[in-house]
Every structure is written in structure tokens, then in C-alpha cells.
Amino acid sequence: NDRPARVTLADVLCRMEQWDAAVFHLRAARDLPDPAATAEEDPGARLGSVLARLEQYEEAAEILLEAVSRFPAQYQLLSNLSFVAEKLGRYEEAEQAAGLAVESKSDLPEAWNHLGLALRGQGRVAEAIDAFQRAVALRPDFPLAEFNLAVTRMLAGDLAAGWAGYERRFDMGEAEVARFGEPRWDGSPLDGKTLLVVAEQGLGDTIQFSRFLCGLAARGARVLFRCAERLHPLLSTLTSTGQPIELIAPGQPLPPVDCWTPLLSIPGLLGISLSTIPQRPHWLAADPELQAGWSTWLREQTPEARCRVGIAWQGAPGYRRDRERSIPLAAFAPLTDVPGVQLVSLQLGPGTDQIPAAAGTVDLVTPPETFDQQTGAFQDTAALMQSLDLVICSDSAVAHLAGALGVPVWVALSRVPEWRWLLERTNSPWYPSMRLFRQMKRDDWNSVFEQMAAELKQQDNGE
């Protein structure tokens, strides 16, 4: 029986990060039964963990469940199962597994962290905060748990308590940013200094937090913003009462600077709370010539419409929570039934493949293939938005763009959304022109769009 040898070889391969080879040998070992094997020797438990690392969560869950049936009190196995179940959105199952893990070993910080994620996924925020605090108390240097504690506090509305822990995003792979030799800005006065701000995370994050650049310039700083070059045309419209914001592309030579900061670290350095978020009707603008052209196109395409509504349903598919935030195009069908409403697609790239299948239920006007392909990211989108009566979309960069332009926008949110959307409230402290429509039950988009359709009908009736 070469089962022990295969397990040992797989362990070596894992240390060498040769994951596919390790999976091959663990599968082979799993096919060789050994009734006397302990949980620590079990190839199934190892295989489930490796598959989870490879983000093959469905198979990992199946294998870990089978292993748990044989070793029901093995706390590490239960903790791993909780991790995988949470990734799949099976929060009750994740809670049960993590709960059993901490019952078996109450000083296991990973299990408390997994329990916190499972509770947060169910909207039980206070309990989640308690679980994350237990994890951090057991392991004071635990970046992942500190980050999870921070964003859960922010989700609950306590931004000020979350910013410090949010900095741990750089220590656990949540965000990457180029490093520079100059000192990090510490929040001290900037008058007369040159500050380099570096974009991070997604395009929506860049749009949302670009508002803070204007305030830094108003404090007397020369602000250089290093961000994707395709965003430069849009961000060149940033309005500042101080010096103009200077845009720099990655790889472009930098002038001498006094200090630098990642973009999403700015609100923490400024001590921003819900009540001190800079309130501006808008801080970006569409190109006037493009807006005039798209306004003409829109009137020609929708001559009978009384309410022209731009929609977008799919965010970047690589985002870890995209399964919860993106919406099937077919879910927008109730809006099509509202008299006088014409839907106009603002969707680019991933998600557009749903348009043919939804054609029978969603009446949708789509821009030509050149849309946003020639003038820079979101240039055409911004111009078309400014000509619409309303934008309705998922949690995506489109939502942030509409808010930053001051365009009326309704955002459809999952039961427990990202921290920036908070809980329960129907408006956003980040965007005055935005309304939030939330799932009452997980994965239930029907009620969200039925509510939107009812409100559109009321508006059409002048109520």
C-alpha cells in the first residue's frame, strides 16, 4: 500500500507549491482505503484543503464534508469546511462547521475568523464583530481577522473604528499598490508639499475615492495621482479649488515628491466618519461634445420613451464577491413592463453575452460596438448617462460613475453588501443622487426589481 508514501510526497509538493501534482497524488491516495488512518493522515482532508487553495470550492466542499463524516470532532477539518462553505455563500453551513470547530478547540483563531465571516454573510453583524475580536485576541498579529473586523465595523456604520484595520489589506492580499521610497503621508499638513497618491483596487474604488483629491489640493498640496492611463480623460474633469490634480500613468517618470499614499488610505488619515464624508453633488463631468452626440443618438433610438433608463448588471467577474453582487439581466424584466420606460444598455464586456437570451423579456436598446472603445474608459458611458433620466445597476463601477457625475441612480444590492453600502438605509452618504434597493432575502432579486418597477409607475403617474 503506497498510500502513506503518496501523502508524504503530496506534502513535499505542496511546500514546493506544485499544487496540481499534489492533487494528483492525493486523489490516488484517497482511492486506497486505510480504516486505521487518523484525520492528520487522511488524504481526503489534505485534498480538500489543496482544492480550496486552488479555489475549486465545490469539489473541496464535497471532499471535506465526506472527511468530516469520518472525523466529526477534528477542529482543523471543520474550520477548513467552514472556509469553503463561506466562499460558496453557504453561510449557515459555514456557521455550523466553525461553531463545532471552536467548541472542539476554543483557542483556534482561524475558526473564529471563519465563524465571523459566516455570521456576517447572514447579516448578523454584532455577532460577527465579536467573533473577529476573539480571533484577534487569540492572535494579535492576524491581518486577515483584523481586516475582516475593520470592514464589518464599517459595514455597521462605524467608519472611524475601521480605517486602521482597513490598512491590513496590504498584508493579506486584498489590495496591491506599488511601493515608493519617499515617506508615507501620515496626515500631517500638506501646504506647499507635493503628494503622490496611488490608485488601488478597482475602477469603482478609484472613482469613489477620487473625491478626496480635491480636498487635498484645497489644503495647499500639489497632488499627483498615479492611475490607469485609460481613466485620465475622465479624471481630468476633477474639479478642485486648489491646484489642478496632475494625472500620471504607471511607468511614467515621477517628479520629486515629499510623500505618498495609497488612495484608499486617505479617508483614514483624514479621520473620516459617516458625518464627515465630503458632500458634493458631483466631482466628475462628461465631455460636452460626447454628451451632445449621445443625446442625439438616444433621442433617435428612443423617440417614444418618457423615461430613459440606463442599466448595467455585471461587475468584474474576477472580484471575489461577484457572485452575490452581479445580477442576471433577466431580473430587469419587470422594468420593461412599466409604460413609457425604455431600457438602454450601459453594460460593457462580461455580461453582454446575456443580451440575446433575454431579448424576449427585456426590451433593451444597445449602443454600437464602438461604445467606450475609442475615447478612454467611461467617456461614452458618462456622456450617455448625462442624457438619461435614470441609471439602474448592480454594485459596480457604473454605480460609482453615476454617483460621481450626480446622475440619478438606483443601485440593486445583495442582502449583505460591501461595507461602503452599509446596512438597511435607502440612501448613500457617499452619493447624494443615489438610492439603494436591497434584497430582503438572499439571492432574491425579484422583489428588488418589482419594487423599482412600482416606483417607476408611481413617478409616471405623477404620484
Image (cartoon, rainbow, N blue to C red):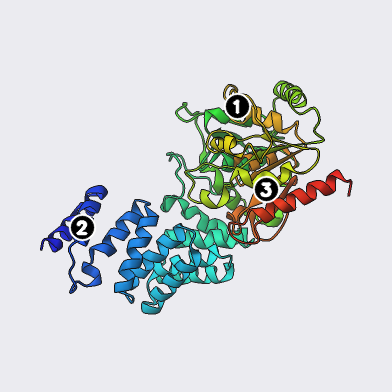
Q: Quadrant where the N terminus lies? A: bottom left
Q: Amino acid at mark 2?
A: Asp
Crowdedness near tag 2: few (<14), some (14–19) or many (≥20) residues, C-alpha within 10 Å = some
Q: Is residue 10 above or below residue 314?
A: below
The answer to whether residue 244 shows anywhere in this view is no
* Label 1 sits on residue: 372
Q: Nearer the viewer, residue 174 or 118?
A: 118
Farthest-out residue, front: 360
Residue drawn at x 72%, y 55% as measured from the top left: 426
How far from the left and from the top, in percent, is residue 82? 41, 65
* Label 2 sits on residue: 11
Pick whichever of labels 1 and 2 is earlier in the sequence. 2
How far from the left and from the top, in percent, is residue 362? 67, 39
Label 3: which secondary element: strand
Describe residue 71's horizontal placement relative to residue 204 as left or right. left
Q: Is residue 282 above or below residue 326?
A: above
How far from the left and from the top, in percent, is residue 52? 35, 56
Crowdedness near tag 3: few (<14), some (14–19) or many (≥20) residues, C-alpha within 10 Å = many
Kindly indicate whether the residue at mark 2 contacts the one at mark 1 (C-beta within 8 angstroms): no
Label 3 and label 1: CA atoms lie apart by: 22 Å
* The quadrant where residue 143 appears: bottom left
* The quadrant where residue 223 appears: top right
Q: Is residue 73 above or below residue 172?
A: below
Q: Nearer the viewer, residue 15 or 84?
A: 84
Pick whichever of labels 3 and 1 is earlier in the sequence. 1
Tag on residue 411? 3
